[in-house]
Amino acid sequence: MVKLSVIVPFYNVQTYAPDTLRSLRANAREDFEFILVDDCATDGTPEILERAERDLPGAVYVRHEKNGGLATARNTGLDKSTGEYITFLDGDDWLAPGYYEQMLAAMEDLGCDFVRTDHVQCTARARTITRVPHGRRNVVMNPRDAILPTDRSTSVDYPYAWAGMYHRRLADEGLLHFTHGLRTAEDRPWIWRLHREARSFAVLGVHGVFYRRGVSSSLTQIGDVRQLDFIRAFDQVIEETARDRDADALLPKAVRTYCAIISHHLGNIERFEPQVARKLRSMSAAAMKRMPQDVLKDALDSMDYERAARLRRVKRRPAGAEVAA
């Protein structure tokens, strides 16, 4: 029986894929499988993965005939996975040797639905430990209790799917799949759903996953229209949270986070293509009009002057025809 399934999407990362695959080899075990999803890459990535299928113990190679994006690639891996536990890795990141074995042992000892871990952020030669914004470590808790407070970073603001491990029962209950087709912020509805609906989680004090920042092919570095999928992602967070039994308590957190992300993108609008920048403003205005207006007012009142003023200016914009696009 497969103990752990590791789902790794790849798209045009031929420069980094060999490092990723070497780190998987340093984490291999006879009961681990590595599902390598080629999201229709157009560089040398497919050839690298074909070799890995032969050389990496436990490798399962899957190729998309059409590029679907990270969310869809992860879903493909989930559907192929057979392990009792599941985790993710991106095709341009890497792991410390023995990291998965350490995390799996801790998770089995705790017996919870999922665990979250710190990670090492890598920008050029700089290394910085980024911690889960949750103080208690190695203690099993109710994930709902880690969503609030509204005005501080919490576990739902740390959405990285690869910074954790998940029991198979969550996939069986429909909690691990991502919204098909989301090109960015695909992990935001995912982490909110996980924290609202799973029964138990813990944060581990380990940091053996290395997250590579500043990769030129990453959507976080590209100012095209795909970046605007964050609006669709957060609309989903608001819609689903509004149906929750604790909506009155949780919606202020969801709305404030949505506003903070909108403000972040507006504050960096110069990196977008001009037509995308115009669409960002219009779609942001429409998004704020869709939010519960009393909750939105409280969220804006709680933010610093610069961010609140930026959002209020955009909110006053008329919703143009480009919103529908």
Image (tube, rainbow, N blue to C red):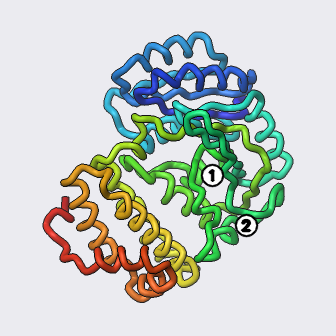
Q: In the rendered structure, which amino acid carries the disc numbered 1? A: Leu
Residue 209, x across and y down, in percent: 67, 38
Residue 95 visible somewhere in the drawing: yes
Secondary structure beneath label 1: helix
Residue at the spot x=61%, y=43% of the render? 121
Task: Check disc 2: other Cα within 10 Å, few if <14, some if 14-19, many if 20+.
Answer: some
Residue 88 visible somewhere in the drawing: no
In this rendering, the answer to whether 287 lies above or below 246 is above
Residue 127, x across and y down, in percent: 65, 40
- For mark 2, what is the residue? 142
Residue at the spot x=52%, y=11% of the render? 51
Task: Check disc 1: other Cα within 10 Å, few if <14, some if 14-19, many if 20+.
Answer: some
Seen from the viewer's position, the closer of residues 137 and 178 is 137
Residue 302, x across and y down, in percent: 51, 83
Q: Quadrant of the N terminus?
A: top right
Q: Residue furthest left?
A: 321
Q: In the rendered structure, which amino acid carries the disc numbered 2? A: Asn
Seen from the viewer's position, the closer of residues 74 and 170 is 74
- For mark 1, what is the residue? 170
Seen from the viewer's position, the closer of residues 177 and 189 is 189
Task: Examine the image and state in which quarter residue 151 appears.
Answer: bottom right
Secondary structure beneath label 2: loop
